[in-house]
Image (cartoon, rainbow, N blue to C red):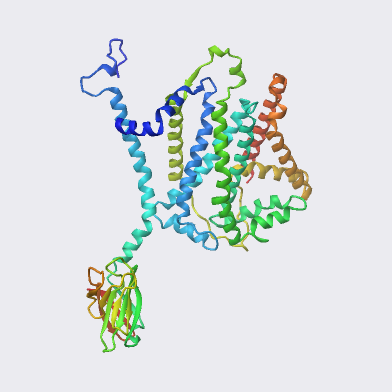
Amino acid sequence: MSKTPTAVLPEESHDNGVSRAQFIKVAVGGMCLAYAAAIGYPVYRYLNSPVEREAALAAIKDVTLAGADKLEAGSVLLFKFGPYPSMLIHHRDGKWVAFDAVCSHLGCTVQYHPDLDKIVCACHGGVYDAYTGENISGPPPKPLNKFQVKVGPGSVLISRA
Amino acid sequence: MAKIYDYLDERLSLSDLKKFGEKKTVPNHKQSFWYYWGGISLLCFLIQLMTGVLLIIYYKPGPDAYNSVRALTYDVDFGWLIRSAHSWAATIFLVSVFVHMFSVYFMKAYRKPREFGWWSGMVLLILGLLFGFSGYLLPMDQLSFVATKVGLAIPENIPLIGHGIANLMRGGMEVSDVTVQRFFAWHAVVLPLLYIPLLVFHLWLVQKHGNAIPPSEEDVPVLERKNIPFFPNFLMKDLAMWLVTLNVIALFASIFPQDIGKVADPLGPAPVGIHPEWYFMSSFETLKLIGKVIPGTIGEAVGITVFTLGLVLWVLIPFYDVKSLAGLRAKRATYFGLLCLGVLIVTTILGYVTV
């Protein structure tokens, strides 16, 4: 800013179309935004920290269940695949299957009914096929996620298809 | 923007608030600088409130205290920053509170009709120190463990009831995870519940009576005294000071982040060179000095009595420094204030030198 006595008051100078008041408004507004970001970003990361850790956990490709090969025929074992509840079913006919135990409707944890030989969700009455995970009645819009199962001596390896 | 303002104004009378702020004035004189320190204390308190809420999200009082602070500091993204900002804002809060108190004292702003401002401020200061004392234990490392043991020896020395009070505060005979749980309840629930309404009362009094002017300014004829509008002039200056304070806290928190020591070991010896936080250093050193002159429990009792008497004199200053007896009396109050300030500073420095 010129200090010569002939200088035009900045408010009156319109050579570049920006008045002093407008400039200050934008500068102050910009500074406020910068401060809000400088405070908001660490706070967001701080709050989001456990989410990031679980996301890393959710990225795992397989899980080994020690001793699960001894699971009795006609019974189920619930386990965690990363952060999510999942189920391993040993059918009476000897077949092994594993699913994501989260209902595709509204996320309740589903359960295996050995008597019906079906997977059901108690929340809204969804029913899934216990071999394929297909949604067969009730509100679920999609089948359950199916995992690959490898039964070995002493453990069962579950992996994403 | 203008439309939104009009919408809100018609319903919430924002322009009344603006008019009020423009009409309200703040004295402008050589000592006006000292008017900012209450506001700085307020900002620090607000920062503590916000960072404190954030810390509660991960902190686990009780037996998990140490591990949760450790995880919060080293594993959670920016946890070190939130924790350091909380601790540095506490330090700067107490610095600004002390500056605020002494400036009020020397400007004699405790005189009628502002006595309740002084008294509520004194209670706020004591609550502030209790915030510091209770918060210090929460990480439950060796230093905070020993410091709390030592600190609780002070109520222990009160005749007859002291032992019972200290046991109640500890939740046992020794500092343990029960104590941490208790101190957390004080630090995060009880003290804020006491502090916030009193703070509102304190601020309401400032609004009611306006800023006090120092005696030197009272000699200036009323018409020659200068005032500036609260809105926008004083508010802008106040906000500028807030911005400076915020930057100082951010800088300190980033350059000198809070670490965590070894986990508290009830059988471990006190660390070498252990000393209290700076705001308790003066009383710590004074007790040590008196203990050298009068050894044993009598010395301790004398020390605590001297403190209590000094504090009572300090709190009751509005009663014996009355305006009608200005001149000589006012000077005595100033000398007493200088003596207190001098003792505080000298014993604090001495404390750090002799540690």
Q: How far across and down, in percent of the image, does residue A155 sit? A: 33, 82
Q: Is residue A159 left or right of residue B19?
A: left
Q: Is residue B71 left or right of residue B166?
A: left
The tally of labels here is 0
Q: Is residue B297 left or right of residue B203?
A: right
Q: Nearer the viewer, residue A113 or A45?
A: A113
Q: Quadrant of residue B113?
A: top right
Q: Is residue A134 left or right of residue A115?
A: left
Q: Nearer the viewer, residue B95 or B32?
A: B32
Residue B137 at least partly seen: no
Q: Nearer the viewer, residue B207 or B88?
A: B207
Q: How far across and down, in percent of the image, does residue B290 sit? A: 74, 43
A13 over A49 or under it: above or below: above
**Residue sitting at the far bottom:** A93
**Residue sitting at the far top:** A5
Q: Nearer the viewer, residue B46 or B154?
A: B46
Q: Quadrant of the N terminus of chain B?
A: top left
Q: How far across and down, in percent of the image, does residue B246 sit? A: 44, 38
Residue B78 at least partly seen: yes
Residue at x 67% of width, y 26% of height: B334
A112 over B293 or under it: above or below: below
B9 over B292 or under it: above or below: above
Residue at x 45% of width, y 59% of height: B71
Q: How far across and down, in percent of the image, does residue B208 sit? A: 56, 28
